[in-house]
Image (cartoon, rainbow, N blue to C red):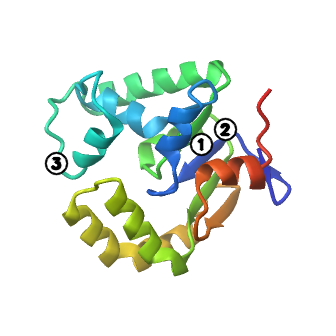
Amino acid sequence: MKYLGKSFDAIVATPCCGKSYLCDKYPNLFVDVDEERLRCKYNVPENITRKEMEETKGNRTFSRRFHGKEYLEELYKKLDQYVEQGKTLILAPHDETIKYLIDNNIKFCFVFPKKTIKEEILNRMTKRNNPQETIIQNAEMFDLFYENNIKENRSIVHYEFDTNEYLENIIFNKFNFKID
């Protein structure tokens, strides 16, 4: 993928831009690292729906599978396998997964919403059934999150998405990702 003349092989993106949708639609091309992260950390039932998983945010009821070093070893081993398969990693800005990218010299683009679309992001959270307390917390923290996103300096390029933009159209239309 390429944006503003800079090539990268992974996407780090904030909530509500369509990471899960993209990975579900194109499972042979993209990996939802957040789901892998969750499944390494917890004993998540195999048949759980995406909606049910979203509804557990802020209140995970699953028993722990791995902790600390074991969790990271398991997660990084899975990510290594996906990279070897040629899949593109799509992840949220969690320190342990960004560390994986940096440690493995995987260049990435950071994708986040423009400051002007706060209400749209909150509506997206409501539509996907995030818990009300999570939506309220994100509403209260949106401006701070935006300021932190602007300052992010580990990626090689930033992309601020606008109204009605989702990761799928960003990747295919702005980043010129091609399906072989």
- Taking the image as drawn, is residue 108 in sight? yes
Given contact means CB atoms under 8 Å apart, are the residues at marks 2 and 1 in contact?
yes
**Element on which disc 3 rests:** loop
* 137 over 87 or under it: above or below: below
Give the CA separation, mark 3 to mark 1: 30 Å
Quadrant of image for the C terminus: top right
Residue 126, by quadrant, is bottom left
- Residue located at (28% from left, 40% from top): 53
Q: How far across and how far down the image is residue 82, in percent?
A: 57, 23
**Residue underneath mark 3:** 59
Residue at 42% over, 40% down: 34
Disc 1 target residue? 102
Report, in whole angstroms, how far the alpha carbon at label 2 lies from the one at label 1.
5 Å
**What amino acid is found at the position of numbered circle 2 in the picture?**
Asn
Does 127 appear above or below 76?
Answer: below
Q: CA distance from mark 3 to mark 2?
A: 34 Å
Residue lying at the far right in this picture: please name it. 5
Res. 75 image quadrant: top left
Instruction: Name the amino acid type tagged 3.
Output: Asn
SS class, disc 2: loop
Task: Tell whether 180 sits left or right of 101.
Answer: right
- Mark 3 vs mark 1: give the one in front: 3
Callout 2: few (<14), some (14-19), or many (20+) C-alpha neighbours within 10 Å?
few
Element under disc 1: helix
The residue type indicated by label 1 comes to Ile
Give the residue pinned by disc 2: 105
Q: Nearer the viewer, residue 96 or 147?
A: 147
Compared with 29, 121 (above or below) is below
